[in-house]
Amino acid sequence: MENKILATVCGRAITESDIDAAIADMGSRAAQYNNPQGRAALLEQLINKRLLLADAASNLYERDAEFKAELARLKEDLLVNYAVKKAVENVKITDDEVKKFFDDNTAMFGGQETVGASHILVDSEEKANEILAKIRAGEISFEDAAKTESSCPSGERGGDLGSFGRGQMVPEFEEACFAMQIGEISEPVKTQFGWHIIRLNTRAEAQPAKFEDIADQLKEKLLVDKQQEAFQHKVNQLRIQFPVDRA
């Protein structure tokens, strides 16, 4: 396939391959540039880059002391990054290691119990008790009361909050929910937001995570942990090999 020349700056061609390479370097952002508009924008960026390089060359910026100092700092950073890469490049995690970690730490992957609840939120205990009495007397449904009386946006959905686990709601609300039975409607519960009438809709026991669902994520975590260990081991060796004098 012909590598089409898109522009020439100071005798140097910018080609389709240059655009492809720029897109490949973008990683997760590549998709948003791999289209006619995005490629056109990248071409302009490459043209500007070549123009600035030409300007730098004509002004002999490479000879400036400030530039040389900056270049030295960048070289140090690159060398450090490369040294870190070399220190951890042989670190590997096998599938057997991942499975063994999962089997040895089943408590970590036990999941958690969840509940589903609806609520009606008002600003006073008196108001909450009035609404609760009407619901229990059958004068109004819980859902209709939530739609007409609740100050929470969930009122539009009849008070439905969906499902949640421990630690996702304020303590007083959570404590009430996890102590209730399905279908039960609570007495008014006070939190920092006001007074709640709660109905428990569902309860689901903790479901242990399946190995196949988390294997890739777990492997990545173990790899990072092992790389950190290898890095620390390398640094400890270097502290013995090279003197470190603290002020």
Image: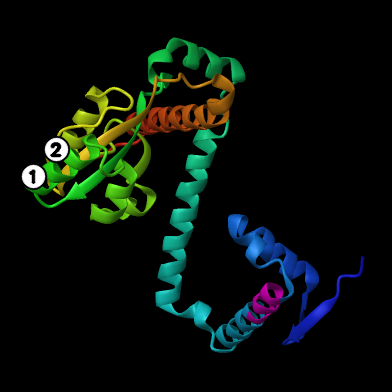
- Rendering coords of residue 147 (x, y %): 31, 53
**Most frequent secondary structure within the magenta stretch:** helix
Mark 2: which secondary structure? loop
Q: CA distance from mark 1 to mark 2?
A: 7 Å
Quadrant location of residue 9?
bottom right
Range of the magenta residues? 37-44
Viewer-side residue, 139 vs 47: 139
Give the residue type that dot 1 points to: Glu
> Which numbered disc covers residue 244?
none
Mark 1: which secondary structure? helix
Give the residue type that dot 2 points to: Pro
The C terminus, quarter of image: top left
Dot 1, how many residues are within 10 Å of its Cα: few (below 14), some (14-19), or many (20+)?
some
Q: Earlier in the sequence, mark 1 or mark 2?
A: 1
Viewer-side residue, 38 vs 114: 114
Write down the residue under mark 2.
188
Viewer-side residue, 47 vs 27: 27
